[in-house]
Image (spheres, rainbow, N blue to C red):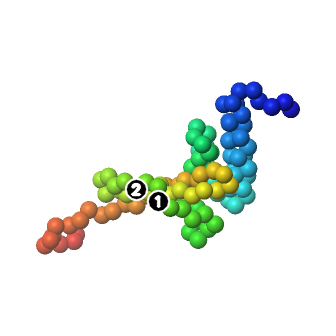
Amino acid sequence: MPGLNNPASARFNGLLKAAMGALHLLDERGLCVRDIRLSGSRPVFEIDPPPAGGFLRGAMRRRETFNGVTRMVMATAFHDCQVEWEITEHHQPARPAGVARG
């Protein structure tokens, strides 16, 4: 197969190859891929949260709290790609002092 003439096509070809390799490895390990983005310098996978103690260990990339819900996006590098997942925590509103629980 001849080389690609267009630099953008060559870049996407490299991203697709990296994404396919990582996709197969994630699938073999039982992880559910929800989305793949190829727009940056490396493919980005969005997955369902991995099981605790699994092989993926992420660092917090973003955290935001709104109306008592904290949403954290975790990220890690994996086979020339980035893998991200979301963890959501719901918080009970704080009770004012002296208010009895119902």
Q: Which residue is mark 2?
A: 63
Reply above or below: 49 against 98: above
Q: Mark 2 is on which residue type?
A: Arg
Q: Residue furthest right?
A: 1
Q: Which mark is residue 12?
A: none
1 and 50: which is toward the camera: 1
Q: Position of residue 39 (x, y in %)?
A: 58, 37
Q: Mark 1 is on which residue type?
A: Met
The residue drawn where x is 59% and y is 71% is: 53
Quarter of the figure with residue 96? bottom left
Element class at badge 2: strand
- Asked whether the beta carbons under mark 1 and mark 2 sit within 8 Å of each other, the answer is yes
Q: Is residue 27 visible?
A: no
Reply above or below: 7 against 54: above
Determine the CA span between mark 1 and mark 2.
Answer: 7 Å
Q: Is residue 101 visible?
A: yes
Q: Which mark is residue 60?
A: 1
Reply above or below: 29 against 37: below
Quarter of the figure with residue 26? bottom right
Quarter of the figure with residue 7? top right
87 and 77: which is toward the camera: 77
Would residue 21 be found to the left or right of residue 66 on screen? right
